[in-house]
């Protein structure tokens, strides 16, 4: 199953970075806690894994034929989490750039006004 979930370590790293750096932005966007998504992912994988382990059929045939299909839900959840963090990060960067431009503009206007008023 791990071979079909190569995105999991990347998604976990992005989750940690996002929670440390972008938590306020996520709250401002009124998005739920990412722990719910990760809980759903872990629960679905645990159910699939338990089915493979305690299932009555020969395991090698199951793994060969269905492990890719049974991990699709977890993969979609992890890619969705990555997409959410990407949008939050882009929005935060875009907002930061525009706030810097707005902060610089009044200063530039007041300097120009001071220069030409004398």
Image (cartoon, grey):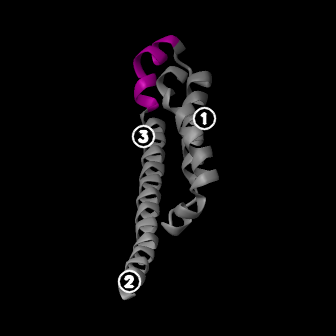
Quickly name the residue at label 3. 76
Using the numbered discs, state the Cα–Cα distance from disc 2 to disc 1 in whole angstroms.
67 Å
Please tell me how crowded label 2 is: few (under 14), some (14-19), or many (20+) other residues with Cα within 10 Å: few
SS label for mark 2: helix
Using the numbered discs, state the Cα–Cα distance from disc 2 to disc 3 in whole angstroms.
55 Å
- Between circles 2 and 1, the one closer to the viewer is 2
Please give the range of residues in magenta: 60-71
- Marks 2/1 in contact by CB < 8 Å: the verdict is no
- The picture quadrant where one finds residue 12 is top right
Query: How would you classify the magenta stretch by its main secondary structure?
Result: helix
SS label for mark 3: helix
Quickly name the residue at label 1. 46
Please tell me how crowded label 1 is: few (under 14), some (14-19), or many (20+) other residues with Cα within 10 Å: few
Residue 64 shown in magenta: yes
SS label for mark 1: helix
Question: Sequence-wise, which precedes: disc 2 or disc 1?
Answer: 1
> In the shown orientation, is residue 100 left or right of residue 18?
left
Indicate which disc residue 113 carries. Answer: 2
Q: Position of residue 105 (x, y in %)?
A: 40, 73
Query: Residue at horizontal 53%, vertical 34%?
Result: 10
> In the shown orientation, is residue 104 left or right of residue 21?
left
Q: Where is residue 9 in the image (x, y as percent from the top left)?
A: 57, 32
Residue situated in front as seen by the camera: 76 or 64: 76
- Is residue 58 visible in the rendered image? The answer is no
Residue situated in front as seen by the camera: 95 or 10: 95
Question: Sequence-wise, which precedes: disc 3 or disc 1?
Answer: 1
- Between circles 3 and 1, the one closer to the viewer is 3
The image quadrant where one finds the C terminus is: bottom left
Query: Residue at horizontal 47%, vertical 18%?
Result: 62
The correct choice, above or below, for 97 with respect to 7 in the image is: below
Please tell me how crowded label 3 is: few (under 14), some (14-19), or many (20+) other residues with Cα within 10 Å: few
Using the numbered discs, state the Cα–Cα distance from disc 3 to disc 1 in whole angstroms.
16 Å
């Amino acid at each position: 199953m791990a071979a079909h979930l190569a995105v999991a370590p990347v998604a976990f790293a992005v989750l940690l970075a996002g929670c440390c750096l972008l938590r306020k932005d996520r709250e401002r966007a009124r998005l739920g806690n990412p722990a719910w998504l990760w809980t759903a992912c872990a629960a679905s994988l645990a159910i699939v894994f338990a089915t493979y382990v305690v299932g009555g059929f020969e395991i090698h045939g199951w793994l060969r034929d269905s492990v890719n299909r049974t991990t699709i839900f977890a993969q979609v959840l992890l890619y969705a989490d990555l997409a959410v963090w990407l949008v939050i990060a882009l929005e935060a960067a875009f907002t930061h750039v525009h706030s810097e431009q707005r902060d610089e503009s009044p200063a530039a206007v007041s300097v120009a006004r001071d220069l030409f008023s004398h």
